[in-house]
Amino acid sequence: MSAEITAEITKDYIKKLSAQGKRMDERQPDQYREISVKLNPVGSADGSAEVRIGDTTVVVGVKVEVGEPFPETPESGVLTTNAELVPMASPTFEPGPPNINSIELARVVDRGIRESKCIDLKKLCITPKEKVWIVFIDMHVLDYDGNLFDCCALAAIASLRNAVVPAKKFGVGEDYPLPVLHLPVSCTAVKIGSSVLFDPALDEEKVAEARLTVSTDENGDIRAMQKGLSGSLTYDEISRIIGTARRLGADIRARHLG
């Protein structure tokens, strides 16, 4: 049997299961796969984390260096986020410069962190208009089996939370913890037919018609949202996704960032 025929059979099976409120791995529609968080796996980083959601694995490293502020924010530090889709993580990843998928991934994670005011950037000013701390978040996908948005977002927050500003290294005082104020958590759902499934595995992503990623903070406030894929979502579906994302986000935060 050819790979194309096998793929179509799998897609049809996933659609039939979702119509019955079931999934291939027997999870509930709003149930995440097992999540694990390992802190500081990268010794050379100022903060790092390895996160697994099911068989999706990412490593995020944070580096904090001295640089110049942006002209429009002369008294604030700088945040920059980058995602690398390592070819060995998936046959669909190719070597070369960042493509549209890695750019979108970096932007979605960055937006959740930035819009939640996760980091107090004003406390990263060394000399106004001249010298500030620049926080680099580098995300590396090691294994891809769906839901990179949530996996990378969780790894990024875990890395930031245990990161240290290396002030002594640059001769500007003593080292101190990165000033993290909030802990946003990203929750992603996809729509397959009339069903909405959270934490989609790779096979479910391939069948999905629409995707919505919702980032909420510890107060349950929405900090960022990203709609993906070409399908549509109804008002009621969006409302249900937001409500579920708040509940799941609180649970993930308590279990893995508490």
Image: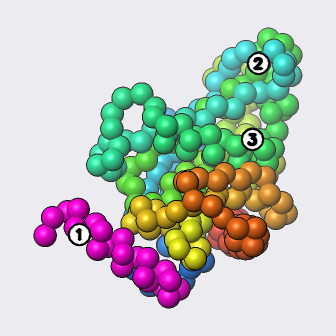
Question: Mark 1 to mark 3: distance in Å?
Answer: 42 Å
Name the residue rendered at 29%, 49% in the picture: 91
Type of amino acid at the residue the image marks with label 3:
Arg
State the residue in front, 172 or 231.
231
Mark nearer the N terminus (2 vs 3): 2
Question: Mark 1 to mark 2: distance in Å?
Answer: 53 Å
| Residue receiving disc 3 | 114
Q: Is residue 63 visible?
A: yes
Nearest-to-viewer mark from 2 and 3: 3
- Most frequent secondary structure within the magenta stretch: helix
Name the residue rendered at 72%, 27% in the picture: 78
Type of amino acid at the residue the image marks with label 1:
Thr
Crowding near pointer 1: few (<14 within 10 Å), some, many (20+)? few
Type of amino acid at the residue the image marks with label 2:
Pro
Q: Is residue 129 left or right of residue 30?
A: right
Q: Is residue 88 left or right of residue 48?
A: left
**Residues in magenta?**
1-23
Q: Residue furthest top?
A: 130
| Residue receiving disc 1 | 6
Residue 13 within the segment the image draws in magenta:
yes
Mark nearer the N terminus (1 vs 3): 1
Nearest-to-viewer mark from 1 and 2: 1
Q: Which mark is residue 69?
A: 2
